[in-house]
Amino acid sequence: MGSRKVRRPALPPTAATPLRTCGASAHYSTRLLVNYAQSCKRSCTATCYQSQRRMPAVERRAPQLVPLELCPSGTLNKTATGGRGCVGDPSALQTSTPPPPDPWPPTPYTVFMLKPAKLALEDGTVFAGTSIGAEGEVDGEVCFNTSMTGYQEILTDPSYRGQIVTMTYPQIGNYGVNAEDVESQRPHLAGFVVREHSRTQSNFRSEQSLSEYLEHWGIVAIESIDTRALVRRLRTRGALKGVLSTVDLDDASLVAKAHASPGLVGRDLVREVLPDQPFEWQEPLSEWTHLQGRGARSEEREGGMEQGARSRENIVSPEPPAPSPSPHVVALDFGMKWNIPRHLVDMGCRVTILPGTASADDVLGHEPDGVFLSNGPGDPEPLEYAIRTIRGVLGKKPVFGICLGHQLLGLACGARTFKLKFGHRGANHPVQNLDNGLVEITSQNHGFAVAEESLPPFLRVTHRSLNDGTIEGLAHRDLAAFSVQYHPEASAGPHDSHYLFRQFLESMNVAVGARA
């Protein structure tokens, strides 16, 4: 017996009349209740409805779309023309009897005018897509991040200064953006590349769409390119310089500009993201950080006290309160993510943030109990001022470094750094703790690493990447100083490595006790 197709009731015949917008491209509706033969001195808009065939493409974004209605006087309602009304001969307006209500009314949708954009690489590869951000042209090193979430934290991470970031996850923007999930005052990356930008924000915390956020901050961004092909090329050939543009769409011109881009090696990008002056940090961690504690208590009920304790220690890792008086941490800001001082404050520390250009005398003049070396952008070797400062505080105060701070600690101890082929960027990188053998899933963002063959005897490797074997952690054998290449504050990312902040707190407490 053949299957039957359920047919919708036939719609009453209506003419699909083009709505003229003062010489601009026409918008079409398949269910117009009003036909008119007049023109407007100002643009009129109308609601466009889905039909069995796609609407014709238009050249630029339409204003807010509103339905056409008839006033009691027989003229076009002003809401149909943005409150301005239409001018012309009202007698030319032809009206028709409205049809009965449709049991399945069509869904209105907004027509987006697509703006072309192109991404060109220095090897001659060009990707054509659509702009989802500000208009303009930027150059930088093209890299990729494998995180499935956390795009707003990535956008506002100062470590991405001078880079065009490609997201490998295919759809980005589906939970919008908000004022809370930021890691600095503004986005710092040069450009943003996604496969598909979600035009729907499905999250109760969303305050703005990703596209609106990018446009507001002047970030050039592109969608609808083959990001898998782009990432394969970067993994095969290594990091490449590129140009992302909405204003110059000539392939040869873009490739030439990509060749001329300065790249990252040898540049001091830290000076572009430094804070203006020292300040005290007081904001603790977000209330969302510890929500998994409920799951830990559930495991405790189901699997016993020991299993629940392991869950809290290894997964949630709430920070213990610091003894009184609170340890004073001076953080050298080379482009620090805000979730780092949040962790320190959450442990009960008093946090003073100094620009990364501060001298050792400046640091020690604040009488800290410990010194923190933050993350930051670019090549660590040009930062001679930071290396001198670290050498000036080693042995005098406990030191803890993250990411760029890890590399600078290695340089201050006499090691060398090198540029990775395509870097580590994502929230799913496995790292082994060599002291206890445990594996941590970590959040990472770096394009340089410490060369193991250059390590002095008094530095030992504490953590190692399980992807490529590079150094992920160092500790001084004689002094209270240690560092990790990844991001234990993990915003966004897993919480496996929160224990490192407690380790720093313990080293400060030991130093304070020794002085007492």
Image (cartoon, grey):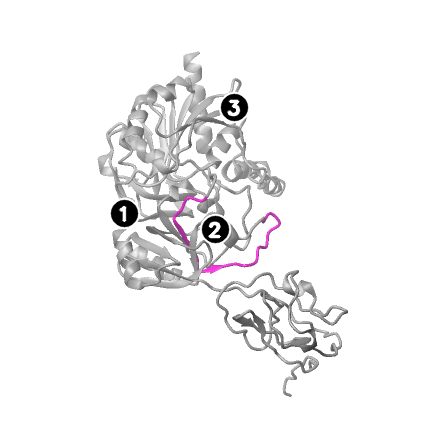
Please provide percent x and percent y for residue 218.
Answer: 45, 49
Farthest residue in the bottom direction? 1
Give the answer, above or below, for where 472 lies relative to 231. Answer: above
Q: Amino acid at mark 3?
A: Ala
Q: From where the camera sits, is residue 137 visible? A: yes
Residue pointed to by mark 1: 262
User: What residue range appears in magenta?
Assistant: 187-206
Residue pointed to by mark 3: 322
Depth check: give the residue in front, 271 or 198.
271
Side of 202 relative to 406 (left or right):
right
Farthest residue in the front direction? 89
Side of 93 relative to 465 (left or right):
right
Kindly report the distance in space between the C-alpha atoms of the residues bearing marks 3 and 2.
Answer: 40 Å
Instruction: Find numbered disc 1 in the image and state the secondary structure of the residue it sits on.
Output: loop
Depth check: give the residue in front, 93 or 136.
93
Q: Amino acid at mark 2?
A: Leu
Residue pointed to by mark 2: 214
For the C terminus, which image quadrant?
A: top left
